[in-house]
Amino acid sequence: MSNHGMSVIVRTVTRFVYGLIILFGFYVIMHGHLTPGGGFQGGAVVASAFALLLVAFGSAGLKGRLNLHWLQSIEEVGALAFLALAFLGIGTAFFYNLLANSGGFLFGASVPAGANAGVLNAGGTVPLMNWAVGLKVMTGIAAVAITMLIGSKKEETE
Amino acid sequence: MRKAILFVTFLFVSAFLLLGVAEMRPFGQPAVADMDDYFITNAQGEVAVNNVVTAVVFDYRGFDTLGEATVLFAAVVGILALFRKPKEDER
Amino acid sequence: MNIGNLPFIAAALLVAFGLYTFLFKRNLIKLVIGITLIEMGVNLFLVTLGYRTGGISPIYTYAPEAQQMVLPTPQALTLTSIVIGLATTALLLSFAVFVHRHYGTLDIRKVKELKG
């Protein structure tokens, strides 16, 4: 694999598509409590967009855009946010859902029983945990992909 | 000789797998479904979530998700530590 | 349509193929492929256990009325298992990269001879 990535066709299509892939991943994370999907799946979709950028442009095209230290910091922030949300209901039990059905502003609405059209502002800590886990998975997999590409490239030059 | 032993082992284990399939109960009829029926009935009232799988992952069985997040974190940290550039005085 | 016990047979065949790859191949990458095949067989078996005949997916958004749903717990645990499998596969592949960098080969017999 060269340092400058793949051909012009691949690079042009990648420029058109990668924003849409990232948008779709964030949609899957945001609607994780209403539709199929969730934090893990949406994070994997966003990480696949990063991997596509990496393959199309090579490691030289990523210089200055994605920093490994930043990615690792965001991953740790996601993990700590997940733990903090789990500790939020420690008064009753670990992982107790304190915000659900509280009627408050933050995801506190109730859901009608049976099949319905979906209430976005419901679920308590579940959508927040979706966001935390989504951040963690997308940055974690992107960091792994970048590290493995750069590491295997160093081997060829030596 | 070694290959023969390996082949016998492979045939033995595969035969037991297929034997287990032959004794399996019919597809589409779970043996015990009480806990899952409770989740399906009460997820909308207790967690206020339409997606029952998400309710199970993040609320009823949060401990499993915590352990899984820990495994993913450990794997990412291990890979980053493996591919780290060695400093000049460590060579 | 009645498909009988075909999903269980498919899961058993996946595990058997993975076991064959794991026992008879010498290349480290192929060993990783074998481990992944065994993993996929186990995941398929778990999802298959939770299926109810005629059930819909356990999601209430625009669901058809008065239909029974498949079991949600095996699906949730399979989701956990898939992510753990991804982490394990990434770690195994990076170990393979390091073995190739250090010994210049991926054959485990040659790696054993070159030890030291």
Image (cartoon, rainbow, N blue to C red):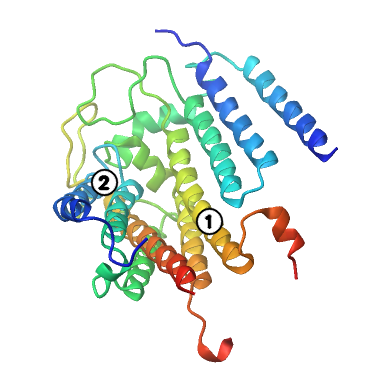
Residue drawn at the location 55% of the way across and 43% of the way down? C33
The residue closer to the viewer here, B57 or A137, is A137
- The residue wearing badge 1 is C93
Q: Is residue A85 visible?
A: no
Subunit bearing disc 2: A
Residue A142's disc number = none
In this rendering, the answer to whether A4 lies above or below A9 is below
Q: Amino acid at mark 1?
A: Leu
Q: Percent x, y for residue B66?
A: 46, 55
**Label pair 1/2, CB-CB below 8 angstroms:** no
Q: Percent x, y for residue C52?
A: 43, 19
Q: Percent x, y for residue A151?
A: 45, 68
The residue closer to the viewer here, A70 or C20, is C20
Q: Percent x, y for residue B8?
A: 79, 30
Q: Is residue C53 visible?
A: yes
Would residue C44 be found to the left or right of residue A35 on screen? Answer: right
Graded by Cα atoms within 10 Å as few (under 14), some (14 to 19) or many (20 or more), the crowding at tag 2 reads: many
Would residue A91 be found to the left or right of residue B7 on screen? Answer: left
In this rendering, the answer to whether A61 lies above or below A42 is below
- The residue wearing badge 2 is A123
Would residue A137 be found to the left or right of residue C92 on screen? Answer: left
Query: Which quadrant of the view contains residue C63?
Result: top left
Residue drawn at the location 43% of the way across and 42% of the way down? C79
Number of numbered markers: 2
Residue drawn at the location 57% of the way across and 61% of the way down? C95
Q: Amino acid at mark 2?
A: Gly
Distance between the alpha carbons at the discs numbered 1 and 2: 38 Å
